[in-house]
Image (spheres, rainbow, N blue to C red):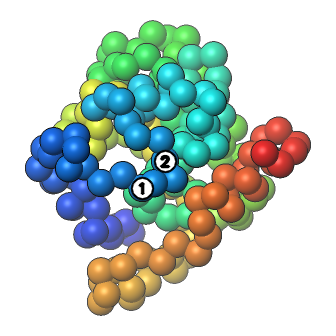
Amino acid sequence: METIWAPWRLDYIAKEEKEESQVEQPEKHVQPKSDCFLCDYRQQPENDKKNHVLLRGEKTFIVFNRYPYNNGHLLIAPQEHLGDLTEIPVEVQAECQAMLVKMVEVLRKVVHPDGFNIGLNLGQVAGAGLPGHLHWHIVPRWNGDANFMPVLANTKVIPQSLEALYELLKKELTGKQT
């Protein structure tokens, strides 16, 4: 069994509550208005490119993970702020599943992974960094993608910027550059 070893994410998962003025945000992203970045992104379609929102469905949307395990790590979330799997209406579940399948196809075509980790973390104790807004992770995997850098240097090498991969996936989804 392989393990995705990502010790640098512990700071993100276990971080203490900070006052909004103390929270560091990358300048290129729109500042959050609430405690839920997914709800903020849902309400800001004009900022989709800055926020790396890749695709919007009727009831769901897809965004790049800003703290990726691997290149192409995506999040698929219902538009509604729901924190438990049992709260999600069947039609939203169906659209989430359809989006998962669609993005596996697109990622296979664009970045050519050898496999995927797909799942969700239900509850903070299960690793959910945003336990109030359920979301699925799609993590492309390649043979040998867990190399020495994370173990020896506490560093993960992601070979492509979010912006560059956003453009490639968006082109595949829409047939045009943004």
Q: Which mark is residue 26?
A: 1
Q: Residue at x 27, y 27 (%)?
A: 132
Q: Residue at x 30, y 54 (%)?
A: 24
Q: Who is closer to the viewer here, 10 or 139?
A: 10
Residue 50 is situated, as x and y percent measured from the top left of the image, at 58, 45
Res 80 → quadrant: top left
148 in relation to 132, above or below:
below
Q: Amino acid at mark 2?
A: His
From the image, tell me which residue sits under label 2: 29
Q: Residue at x 52, y 72 (%)?
A: 158
Q: Amino acid at mark 1?
A: Pro
Label 2: which secondary element: loop
Q: Residue furthest left?
A: 16
97 in relation to 16, above or below:
above
Residue 173 horizontal side relative to residue 21, left or right: right
- Report, in whole angstroms, how far the alpha carbon at label 1 lies from the one at label 2: 6 Å
Q: Residue furthest right?
A: 175
Res 150 → quadrant: bottom left
Label 1: which secondary element: loop
Q: Who is closer to the viewer here, 136 or 42?
A: 42
Instruction: Tell how many labels.
Output: 2
> Is label 1 in contact with label 2 (beta carbons under 8 Å)?
yes
Residue 150 horizontal side relative to residue 59, left or right: left
